[in-house]
Image (cartoon, helix red, strand yellow):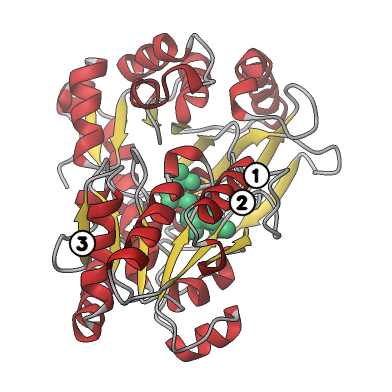
């Protein structure tokens, strides 16, 4: 292991469990989103600080080796649990006992020792509680999304296993520390899951400030194939109903009806690199809705793009938009701000914590296309305000949302978990 940078203390050995979200997987697909990014960036930055991280995930391809040397001080361990092909995360619960046993077998075989276990998502949290006893290490838990919120919003469409809420509550109460990504999640953990606030640590994720950086708009437009004279609204993210891209299509139609503006909407995301309604059914819904509202030719669907080119998509925007029904945290608003673009976003979940209303963008109510259209319209006619908001957004993420800052904070939470519970989580 390399020497430790100043101020990071003794190195910790971390077993980071993330059953469905591997850093190796491509992001942007239906089940591959923010958690993959989080696990990848956090483990790399912990590794850079000198900590040793093993990321345990499910092997979903027979070609994948069991252990991958992923980054400095970071290994990815692909455990055999369930079929060795991609399965949806909602079908994974029944394979978790096997995952737990395989993890313990790996530890026995290799003689690995861990100071702390970090569970990600409720199923890995359960594995963490189970193996914590054997490994005699405290459990730090990040939920990423809470089942109670999902149930409230998705109702009968929520395909999570029936046991989710009970297991999640069990994990929330047994973990030595629970990480809340934003104040809203902190509130939910206390009020809906009965977690003792002294065990909760507020630690937001970050954004890669070099990958997501401002680029020249004209150059970006050329690269993504859009006219530099057009007004362009950009959405980046998974294309699933709860992200409510339909709301953005409706707002576009409202803007075209009620103003002289005729912007284009660029929608980036989906299962494949091409916008295919068979693999991403929501793409079919968006196409249908757009043509029904007469804005079919103003909407450009690109399919999924890799993170290393996303700055050109954000950079092509006059305004970036995201209006999910709910959002546990939301990395894409941070990415838009890092790219120096104003963001119009629904005031739900983590978004009011990351986006400063009136300074780095505008907050609107969810599921309100008229309010969204008004907010977008007000920015499209004010280029100087857009530039000022973009610059303020970049400053905000540099000051508050770097991955280095996140990793240092999480390392402090790990350390606090080695102390008796009564000493509480460190304050930010
Ligand atoms: N993303 C991507 N390619 C795409 C669409 C999305 O790499 O085509 C990434 C996006 O940049 C972000 C993540 O997927 O980092 C989505 O994270 P977010 O927290 O916004 O939403 P989640 O998917 O976790 O619900």
Q: CA distance from mark 3 to mark 2?
A: 26 Å
Dot 2: few (<14), some (14–19), or many (≥20) neighbours within 10 Å? many
Asked if labels 2 and 1 touch by Cβ distance under 8 angstroms, the answer is yes
> Which residue, given by chain and number where applicable, does mark 2 sit on?
270
Q: Quadrant of the N terminus?
A: bottom right
Dot 3: few (<14), some (14–19), or many (≥20) neighbours within 10 Å? many
Q: For disc 2, does the CB lie below 8 Å from ligand 1? A: yes
> Which residue, given by chain and number where applicable, does mark 3 sit on?
362
Residue drawn at the location 44% of the way across and 83% of the way down: 230
- The tag earlier along the polypeptide, 3 or 2, is 2
Q: Secondary structure at mark 3?
A: strand
Instruction: Identify the mark at residue 280; answer none if there is no mark.
Output: 1
- Tell which of 402 and 145 is nearer to you: 145
Residue drawn at the location 58% of the way across and 48% of the way down: 288
- Tell which of 344 and 12 is nearer to you: 344
- The tag earlier along the polypeptide, 3 or 1, is 1
Q: Position of residue 153 (x, y in %)?
A: 36, 27
Q: CA distance from mark 3 to mark 1?
A: 29 Å
Q: Is residue 118 above or below residue 410?
A: above
Q: Position of residue 326 (x, y in %)?
A: 33, 38
Q: Position of residue 238 (x, y in %)?
A: 53, 48
């Amino acid at each position: 292991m390399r020497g430790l940078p100043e101020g990071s203390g003794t190195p910790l050995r971390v077993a980071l469990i993330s059953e469905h979200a591997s850093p190796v997987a491509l992001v942007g697909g239906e089940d591959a989103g923010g958690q993959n990014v989080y696990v990848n960036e956090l483990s790399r930055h912990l590794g850079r600080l000198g900590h040793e991280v093993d990321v345990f995930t499910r092997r979903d391809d027979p070609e994948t080796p069991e252990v991958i040397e992923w980054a400095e001080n970071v290994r990815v361990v692909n455990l055999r649990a369930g079929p060795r092909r991609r399965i949806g995360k909602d079908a994974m619960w029944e394979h978790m006992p096997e995952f737990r046993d395989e993890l313990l077998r790996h530890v026995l075989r290799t003689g690995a020792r861990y100071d702390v276990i970090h569970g990600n998502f409720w199923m890995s949290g359960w594995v963490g509680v189970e193996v914590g006893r054997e490994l005699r290490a405290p459990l730090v838990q990040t939920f990423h999304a809470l089942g109670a919120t999902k149930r409230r919003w998705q109702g009968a469409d929520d395909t999570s296993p029936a046991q989710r809420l009970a297991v999640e509550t069990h994990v929330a109460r047994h973990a030595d520390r629970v990480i809340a990504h934003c104040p809203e999640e902190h509130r939910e953990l206390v009020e809906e899951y009965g977690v003792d606030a002294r065990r909760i640590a507020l630690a937001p994720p970050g954004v890669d400030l070099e990958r997501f950086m401002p680029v020249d708009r004209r150059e970006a437009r050329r690269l993504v194939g859009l006219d530099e004279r057009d007004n362009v609204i950009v959405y980046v993210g998974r294309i699933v109903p709860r992200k409510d891209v339909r709301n953005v299509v409706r707002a576009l139609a409202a803007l075209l009806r009620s103003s002289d503006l005729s912007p284009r909407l660029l929608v980036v995301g989906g299962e494949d690199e091409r916008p295919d309604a068979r693999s991403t059914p929501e793409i079919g819904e968006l196409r249908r809705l757009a043509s029904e509202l007469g804005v079919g030719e103003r909407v450009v669907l690109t399919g999924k793009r890799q993170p290393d080119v996303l700055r050109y998509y954000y950079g092509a925007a006059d305004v970036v938009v995201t209006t999910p029904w709910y959002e546990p945290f939301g990395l894409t608003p941070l990415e838009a701000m890092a790219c120096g673009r104003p963001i119009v976003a629904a005031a739900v979940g983590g978004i009011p914590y990351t986006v400063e209303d009136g300074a780095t963008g505008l907050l609107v109510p969810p599921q309100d296309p008229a309010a969204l259209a008004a907010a977008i319209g007000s920015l499209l006619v004010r280029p100087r305000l857009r530039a000022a908001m973009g610059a303020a957004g970049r400053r905000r993420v540099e000051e508050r949302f770097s991955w280095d800052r996140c990793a240092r904070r999480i390392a402090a939470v790990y350390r606090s978990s080695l102390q008796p519970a009564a000493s509480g989580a460190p304050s930010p």
